[in-house]
Amino acid sequence: MEQYPNVFIFDHPLIKHKVSILRDKRTGMKEFRELIEEITTIMTYESMRDVELVPVEVETPLEVTTQYRVPEESVAIVPILRAGLGMVNGVHKVFPTARVGHIGMYRDERTLEPQEYYCKLPDGIGDKTVFLVDPMLATGGSACDALSALKKRGARKIKFMAIIAAPAGIRAVAEAHPDVPVYISTVDRELNENGYILPGLGDAGDRLFGTK
Ligand code: PRP
Ligand code: URA
């Protein structure tokens, strides 16, 4: 797998542990949802390292001190529907006041081409750091199109976060959007002929929401 300067792969033992349970086909919907959330929270800590802080005066019981905060209005979360919804609470645990936009994309099961069916974003998206989230990065089609859709609507500072990625998807996003930092918890081997990630975890949306 090539090295791309905008791609950050996590190599955290806790994430490895949780991903191994996530992959297990015996893991039920409730635990699956909780694990997606927990992994997202760990990833959010790391991906927020360069987030902009502003100085604020804070009065402690002893004196006034200058401290640093993330401005309330400066972060937005945009899940790619449906499976990205499972990651929203994970980011909110770290940054509870982040506004949430939604982008609806589905993969045409025959062509594997992504189709946008919904987009609603918070006002002032151009001034916010936008966390685009989706647990699965397979061919990269959905993420690439979602990033283009965000940019078309004025987003300028975007970070993309995915839990499991295939090398082809990483390549596609890194090359189409070299300006976007991409955070991946685990890189898998390959895609099968139906565009599923191997070894993967199956269909993330179905496992999160109990469909199929
Ligand atoms: C899954 C996943 C990604 C997409 C990844 O969504 O959540 O959005 O596939 O595949 P790609 O990288 O090849 O585009 P899916 O289309 O299954 O929709 P869902 O979330 O509604 O289940
Ligand atoms: N979407 C999923 O949910 N799983 C995959 O393996 C590929 C795309």
Image: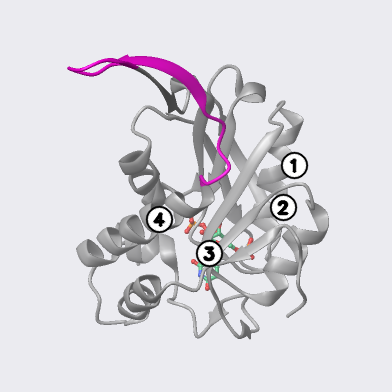
Which sits earlier in the primary sequence, circle 4 or circle 1?
4
Q: Which of the two discs, 2 and 4, sits closer to the camera?
A: 4
Answer with the quadrant where ligand 1 appears in the image: bottom right
Q: Which residues are magenta?
A: 48-64
The extreme left residue here reads 61
Q: Determine which quarter of the picture holds residue 25.
A: bottom left
* Disc ID at residue 40: 4
Q: Quadrant of the C terminus?
A: bottom left
* Disc ID at residue 101: none
161 left or right, relative to 43: right
Q: Callout 2: few (<14), some (14-19), or many (20+) C-alpha neighbours within 10 Å?
A: some
Q: Nearer the viewer, residue 121 or 205?
A: 121
Ligand 2 closer than 8 Å to the CB at disc 3? yes
Q: What residue is pinned by disc 3?
A: 136
Secondary structure category for the residue under label 3: strand
Type of amino acid at the residue the image marks with label 1: Ser
Tag 1–tag 2 contact (CB < 8 Å): yes
Q: What residue is pinned by disc 1?
A: 148
